[in-house]
Image (cartoon, grey):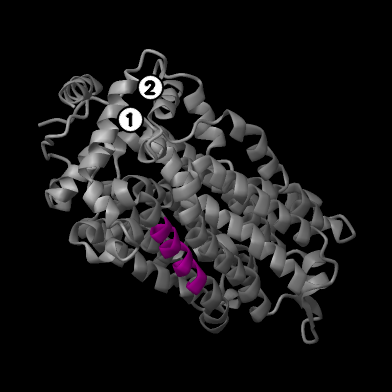
Amino acid sequence: MTQEPSDPIRGLPWLIWVVVIFGSISSAGFGFDQGWWSALMSSTQFVSNYGQLDPVTDTWALTSNQQSLGTGLGYVGVIVGVFGGSPVNERLGRKNTLWIQSFIVTIGIIIESTAEKSYAQFLVGKLLVYLGGGMATSVIPAYQGECAPKSMRGLMAGTYNAFLMVGGFFATLIVYLCQHIPSNWSWRVVVVAQIAIPAASWASLPFLPESPYWLVSRGRLDEAVVSLRRLRGVSFPAEAEVANMQQLLEEQQERRATATWSACVTDSVARRRTIIAVGSQIFSQAQGISFVANYQAVFLQEIGFKEVLLMSVVVFVIGIAANLIFMATADRLGRRNVLIYSAALMGAFMITIGGLTANGAEHMSYQMQVAAVVMLMLWFFTFQYTWGPIAWVLSSEIPPIQMREKSVALSGMGAYITGLIIVFVNPFTQADIGGRVAFIYGALSVLSVLFAWFYVPEVKNRSLEQIDEMFLDKVSARAFQSHVCRTPGDITIAKREAEEFVENA
């Protein structure tokens, strides 16, 4: 049986597009910081200010320890932010969490930008910026998923990853344009410039609605009706939909009372959903994005490529293009098959890169260098079109309604703990085996194919309530797409059942 038709996008109020853009803008801060850090590790002015002089090559560079600390401590901040942001998100709401994280990011930027020679002060500021990024991770996928009509959920939840790319693009562009400034302002400009992101958040937050799901969970039904009408239009039967949400929450009250952190893994139904949400994030990172995002400039230098800063800009242009294509096609192509085929393709790209660079830069011809760079760019495009945004989409739609904040936080922690391990270990591994490090990421892509095949269901154009039903009924991952749900997905049916519920109450 075919699924219910998608919600019509035409006719939705302009506010839904404000949520699409400004509801995710805080994630650009994390992408911005990650983008300029990757570029600055190859910046002469930056490494001469904080790095060490190699007496053999007579060049300045950050040591492996400095690279690991500079990248790894940022991930520690993200993990703390994800974990700490979850209770704030649950108790204070989505908007208040975004206000708090913008304030933390601003403090971190001030500390970073005022560091003169102290690498320790610089790292403290970076830690706070990433902590704010972690809080954004805990709130943005949940907020976008809860505000979205089901036909736009892939698009809206995918904006988190898209804004990571937008932030990274502007960061690397500023680094590239400022590289010839003969002072520390060649890198300090980009650190100061990131203040524009929390400023944009402050300017937009007063106009954004609170999540209707969160309002219903707090018993603020009148406000939830207002929020839904702002998101769907004045003619939308908001009272009926809120009654539907309230009924679902009441039915789940017993499970909600036991929706603890441990229940995410001890309850059999919740455990399966946690494995999918967290596993998709782990395998997303494990296939090599932390390596590409943080060390691609260093990697390109090692294989003899010259224009590494320009290539850093190109990488993020590719990322933005891939995310825009994803947002336009996500709710048509779906999740499951896209993840399976793309992981196989990315594995082939990484193994090819490993083969081209296995013997070191001194044994690479110019043609081999170009081929390695092309493979890297193709890998990055494929990732940003598939696993990069889809992992965040799954984080927003797979978790149970009654423990969404906790599950989103766990999936975010899964991503960043995996990234933390990679960014700490990669500099030393890459120093030992060079370009052959790509073989490791290629092998992990093979494991990602198996994970997607056995665990990831197809949930495109399904309402959050239908997804909940199928997991409760223990439908297999391969049967999700064709399963016939008892829970209506069409708003007309939902309205009729909600009215019956209100009449009988």
What SS does tag 2 mark? loop
Q: Which mark is residue 9?
A: 2
In the rendered view, tell whether residue 342 sits above or below residue 74: above
Q: Residue furthest bottom?
A: 56
Q: Is residue 29 magenta?
A: no
- Please determine whether, in this image, residue 143 is positioned above or below residue 310: above
230 or 484, which lies in front?
230
Q: Is residue 343 left or right of residue 17?
A: left
Give the tally of numbered discs. 2
Residue 365 visible within the image: no
Tell me which amino acid carries mark 2: Ile
State which tag comes first along the sequence, 2 or 1.
2
Residue at image position (82%, 56%) is 186
Question: The C terminus appears in which quarter of the rendering?
Answer: top left
Horizontally, residue 329 falls left or right of residue 92, namely left
Residue stretch in magenta: 409-421
Q: Residue tagged by mark 1?
A: 151
Quadrant location of the N terminus in the rendered image: top left
- Is residue 411 on the magenta stretch? yes
Q: Would residue 388 be found to the left or right of residue 255 on screen? A: right
Q: Are marks 2 and 1 in contact (CB under 8 Å)?
A: yes
Could you tell me which residue is drawn at 40 percent across and 51 percent down?
A: 405
In the foreground, 505 or 93: 505
Q: Give the Cα separation between the discs numbered 2 and 1.
A: 7 Å
Residue 344 appears left or right of 292: left
**At label 1, which amino acid type do we have?**
Ser
**Residue 278 on image: x %, y %:** 35, 60
**Residue at the location (75% across, 67% down)?**
122
The x, y position of residue 450, in whole percent, is: 24, 63
